[in-house]
Image: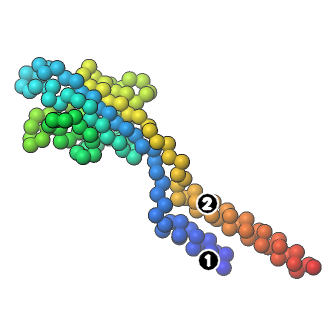
């Protein structure tokens, strides 16, 4: 009986849609290129602040499409590609314009441990904005089985006293 109850509780904990929420990270990419930086395109068309939120810290190559990011009015950007490789100390971004338009990109150099990266014309700020207090589902399972075990101990002790009287 006891094994059945424990198995039932563990299966319910696994089956219930109790989602663990990670921290939320805000990413803000600020671009301020001079119009004459490149000879073949006017880089200033990419100027502005692009911001988006992700439920976890990005690593590796990530593509962000609108409407996942807020973009400046009149911006031609329809894709932001971030390459964040902390283990190799390598960070970069590419901005792509719509309809096979021009693209620009740059390496980003880390500025200490604050989550800010920049080149002379671009800054990427990464901030941890929500430290979620929601425990993981396995924590609920652990607490539930601990409570059941405690109840069983008290039930046995109460049953043993009743038999002696």
Q: Which residue is mark 1?
A: 4
Q: Which residue is mark 2?
A: 142
Q: Give the side of residue 96 with respect to residue 7, left or right.
A: left
Q: Percent x, y for residue 153?
A: 77, 68
Q: Percent x, y for residue 152?
A: 73, 70
Crowdedness near tag 1: few (<14), some (14–19) or many (≥20) residues, C-alpha within 10 Å? few
Identify the mark at residue 28; answer none if there is no mark: none
Q: Write down the quadrant of residue 82 in the picture.
A: top left
Vertical comparison of 10 with 35: above or below: below
Q: Give the side of residue 152 with respect to residue 165, left or right.
A: left
Q: Give the side of residue 136 with respect to residue 129, left or right.
A: right
> Which residue occupies the foreground of this view, 138 or 32?
32
Residue 50 appears in the picture as rendered: yes
Q: Closer to the N terminus: mark 2 or mark 1? A: 1
Q: Secondary structure at mark 1?
A: helix
Residue at 63 percent across and 60 percent down: it is 143
Q: Percent x, y for residue 160?
A: 85, 75
Q: Give the side of residue 39 with respect to residue 25, left or right.
A: left
Q: CA distance from mark 2 to mark 1?
A: 16 Å
Q: Percent x, y for residue 94?
A: 21, 34
């Amino acid at each position: 009986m006891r094994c059945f109850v424990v198995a039932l509780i563990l299966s319910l904990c696994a089956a219930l849609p109790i989602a663990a929420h990670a921290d939320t990270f805000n990413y803000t990419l600020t671009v301020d290129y001079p119009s004459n930086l490149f000879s073949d395109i006017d880089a200033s068309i990419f100027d502005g602040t692009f911001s988006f939120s992700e439920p976890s810290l990005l690593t590796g190559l990530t593509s962000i499409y609108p409407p996942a990011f807020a973009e400046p009015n009149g911006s031609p950007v329809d894709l932001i590609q971030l390459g964040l490789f902390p283990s190799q100390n390598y960070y970069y971004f590419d901005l792509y314009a719509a309809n096979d338009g021009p693209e620009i990109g740059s390496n980003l150099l880390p500025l200490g441990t604050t989550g800010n990266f920049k080149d002379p014309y671009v800054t990427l700020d990464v901030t941890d904005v929500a430290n979620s207090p929601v425990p993981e589902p396995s924590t609920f399972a652990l607490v539930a089985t601990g409570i059941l075990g405690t109840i069983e101990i008290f039930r046995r002790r109460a049953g043993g006293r009743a038999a002696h009287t």
